[in-house]
Amino acid sequence: MTVIWRIALGTLVTLAALVLVLAWFISHDAGPAPVAPIPPQAARMKALVFRQYGGPEVLRIEEVEKPSPKADELLIRVHAASLNPLDWHRMRGLPYPVRLMLTGIGRPRLTRLGVDFAGSVEAVGSQVRHFRVGDEVFGTADGAVAEYVTSTEVGIALKPANSTFEQAAAVPIAGTTALQGLRDAGQLKAGQKVLINGASGGVGTFAVQVAKAMGAEVTGVCSTRNQELVRRIGADHVVDYTREDVTRGNERFDLVLDMVGSYPLLAYRRVLNPHGTLVVVGSPSTDRWIGAMSGWIKATFIRPFVGQHYDVLLADANRTQDLDALAELMRSGRVTPVIDRTYALVDTAEAMRYLEQGHARGKVIIRID
Ligand SMILES: NC(=O)c1ccc[n+]([C@@H]2O[C@H](COP(=O)([O-])OP(=O)(O)OC[C@H]3O[C@@H](n4cnc5c(N)ncnc54)[C@H](OP(=O)(O)O)[C@@H]3O)[C@@H](O)[C@H]2O)c1
């Protein structure tokens, strides 16, 4: 073997070893994070805590220090929170690359869970301009499954008076994903035909209603047991995925919003109009390395080779103007959040177990009394 070949082989072996070490480093689970001591005089509250990655069994309801608002923050008494697939991805630290980019290697960097909440403003910092004590609000905050959260004014909106706290807590991630997927990524116009795959889920039940409010003709894909629900929230047509493959049908669409990733992305070319758009929102989460990112990766590679427009969505649930837009749709009665099940705070692990099965009909809510 020549020197060049030996160097090449040595380099390859070293690279392979480095990749293996990096893979182990990213995917290993360390023991639980230490418990942060609470100063004796500090006020306390109950919150959902996880100190290590794993299934719902790692979730605990614990006493933690009650937060105090900074000058630009509000203190909010949470009445209801909702769970999203994002929460169980964070709980499990999956797919693994999110640990590197977001959640922490070995154990969670942030030990509190939950993003979506609705509640009442209990105190405001001196720089807060748009909210007052007593306002009923909804929005996003890290560690939202807790008795209290603090938040700046960004990502908070006034709760519509005709909505319950549970309904308002259902909105932030799922509602803004539906709105941004249809309006921004999908550029949906009145009169256009839209196909919503996953129409009965958290995002899908908002997407059906928001698309109808935008004047679209809506086809929802769901299973047999959810046909009636999807029709009731406004879908003009419903396709039962257990009996029919919508990508083999004769109907053509201007926009496909895919929350499920159950069809090959190329199959959508058949049912999209020549200038139609596919927006990839969600993908199957079975693979621990790529999982929920598989649809985004595939769509990005396929995009240059197809005539239609293939796009991916990473929603921003922290946009106050979008929460206001959804609140307005709720005030006018054009959007009513669909709530599947409501759990008590102590039963959050059970709620997460249910959501993880992937068959929720609308949103899963945690009631915090
Ligand atoms: N890109 C982003 O910014 C973003 C934001 C939010 C969410 N997401 C992702 O979007 C996806 C959906 O979120 P979600 O909150 O709506 O989840 P979800 O509430 O857990 O979705 C559950 C729903 O999916 C339906 N479903 C399962 N398999 C299906 C299939 N083969 N065809 C059609 N429907 C099917 C289920 O109906 P059946 O019981 O009838 O099967 C159920 O109603 C998740 O992957 C999530 O991670 C992405």
Image (cartoon, helix red, strand yellow):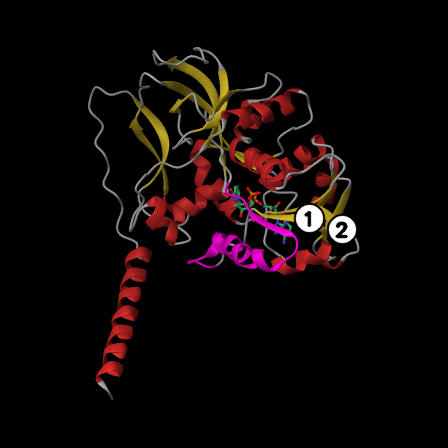
Sooner in the amino-acid sequence: mark 2 or mark 1: 2
Q: Are marks 2 and 1 in contact (CB under 8 Å)?
A: yes
Q: How many marks?
A: 2
Residue bounds of the magenta highlight: 287-314
Q: Is residue 174 left or right of residue 188?
A: left
Left or right: where does residue 251 sit relative to residue 19? right
Q: Is residue 137 above or below residue 8?
A: above
Circle 2 crowding by C-alpha within 10 Å: few under 14, some 14–19, many from 20: some
**Corner quadrant of residue 184:** top right
Please name the residue shown 54% across and 44% down the image: 313
Q: Quadrant of residue 255?
A: top right
Secondary structure category for the residue under label 1:
strand
Q: Residue at x 57, y 59 (%)?
A: 302
- As drawn, the label of residue 276 is 1
The residue that disc 2 covers is 252
Residue 158 image position (x, y, % from top left): 52, 18
Residue 120 covered by magenta stretch: no
Give residue 96's position: percent from left, percent from top.
Answer: 38, 54
